[in-house]
Image: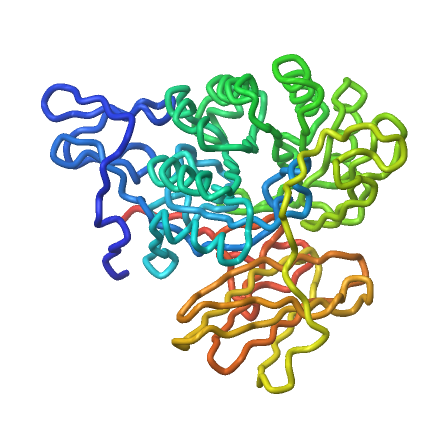
Amino acid sequence: MSQKTWDQEPHPARLEERLDDGVVRCHLSPRNCRIRPGQHGFCMVRANRDGRLVTLNYGRSVHATEETIETEAVFHYAPGARILSMGNVGCMLNCDYCHNWKTSQARYVEDKDIYHYTPEQVVDIALRHDIKVISWTYNDPVVWHEFVVETAALAKAAGLVNLFKSAFFISGEAIEELLPVIDIFSVSIKSLDPKYYRKITKGWLEPVLEGTEQVFRAGKHVEVSTLMVTDLSDDEKTAREMATFVGERLSPEVPTHFVRFHPDYKMTDTIRTPVDRLERARKIALDMGLHHVYLGNVYDTESTNTWCRQCGQLQVTRYGLNADMAGLDADGSCVSCGTRAPIVQLPGARRRARVPEPPAAERVEVAHFDWHGDVRALHVQVRNTADAPVRAYHRRYGDPAADQGWEVIDLAPQESFRYIAAKSTADETGVQVAVPPQCTSSLHQVFDRAHFPTVEAGAGTLNDDISPLPLFQPRTRR
């Protein structure tokens, strides 16, 4: 294996405590890692260099990707909004089923998977593509603290919204630095069982709950989710404990998501969570008094929709990672009874422009991808190799209700752009991508919500219920 270079440019880190003998303590997470000179913390991306705490992943990212806000288990803020997802390297946890293990566990990261961004470049991508929300996501943004805080401040000054999707194993001190710049917190609470946390995530529970309360008390938009792992945490006990925490320590109004698991990382000898168990968990939480309970990573169920609690009017319909306003007016009130919905709308959020066909004068090459089994989402990456702007195009096919023409994607000179396409109706067959000769393109299968790593469409399995991802191979000692 070639020598990695992505971690060779250390950047000064925040939340440093300097101790004797050149030792530093990192106060970013509840671990409070005590790090000797030349050593790393648990996350493997914060280190001691010459007696100072540094971060090794500043500006180091997987490819910036346009997705929808639903990918982040956020249903009550700007439904259907396009977001710019930013993920990095490292994690404060090491969950046995991690869907982002190839980047969350820094030892597996390869230079070919890493892109370099400045805070200004991230904000520029969002502005040029008219994306209103930057999402700090994937592996976990906690370990990207310096870059997140600085970039989010620039984004906020530019009128953008910041979303923090995290397992939230973070110190209260670090949260205080996030509160001025983060608008939305989507917190993944793995379980309410302390023993589960220690064994499966390698962290501990109470700081996660305390941190969630901290951002909720600060008045931020908060949604919570829990991954219902097959035969491990997909039982009624998990649902009851989650509902108790949300109802008693937050508010029954906080949207709560029970998310379907897919086998991954060290936990592949199992199956996807049976949907009936998820539906049962949702019913329990509703019966216990929560107002807004949803399922995640599922299709063909009404348990992803939003109804008016006053009159029962259907307000937001969702299919997979797509959402449509069905019963809300421009002011966010129910079209039937006028009751204000507990959903934040985002002024100025727009979908991409569409054309019936690419202009005849533009010679384009067309690639297509058909949905199969449980693979119903795709990352599309296009790169403009020219020194002038070009346009690429994207459309859905197989269902006239879904096919509303070709979406236009404007690419700056030499720009590489990545976006998600997710199945939007039950009858939709697949997607097509049209690119001019100046562009290269690749299609990457995504299993459920967005994640890294992905594999190109030709390299994944076609089995209905198996993740099309690289297989984790445990290292053996010699």
Q: Nearer the viewer, residue 74 or 36?
A: 74
**Side (left or right) of 171 relative to 65:** left
Residue 183, given in percent of the width and then of the height, sits at 53, 32
Residue 383, given in percent of the width and then of the height, sits at 46, 70
Q: Nearer the viewer, residue 298 or 197?
A: 298
The reply to whether residue 15 is visible in this rendering is yes
The quadrant of the image that shows the N terminus is bottom left
Residue at the spot x=53%, y=56% of the render? 469
Q: Nearer the viewer, residue 438 or 440?
A: 438
**Side (left or right) of 77 relative to 1:** right
Q: Nearer the viewer, residue 91 or 15?
A: 15
| Residue at the limit of the structure toward the top, as seen here | 248
Chosen colour scheme: rainbow
Picture quadrant of residue 226: top right
**Side (left or right) of 349 relative to 332:** left
The reply to whether residue 266 is visible in this rendering is no
Residue at the spot x=56%, y=26% of the render? 220
| Residue at the limit of the structure toward the left, as seen here | 21
Q: Is residue 250 above or below residue 334?
A: above
Residue 129, given in percent of the width and then of the height, sits at 53, 58
Residue 5, given in percent of the width and then of the height, sits at 24, 55
User: Disc count in the image?
Assistant: 0
Q: Is residue 100 above or below residue 214?
A: below
Picture quadrant of residue 157: top left
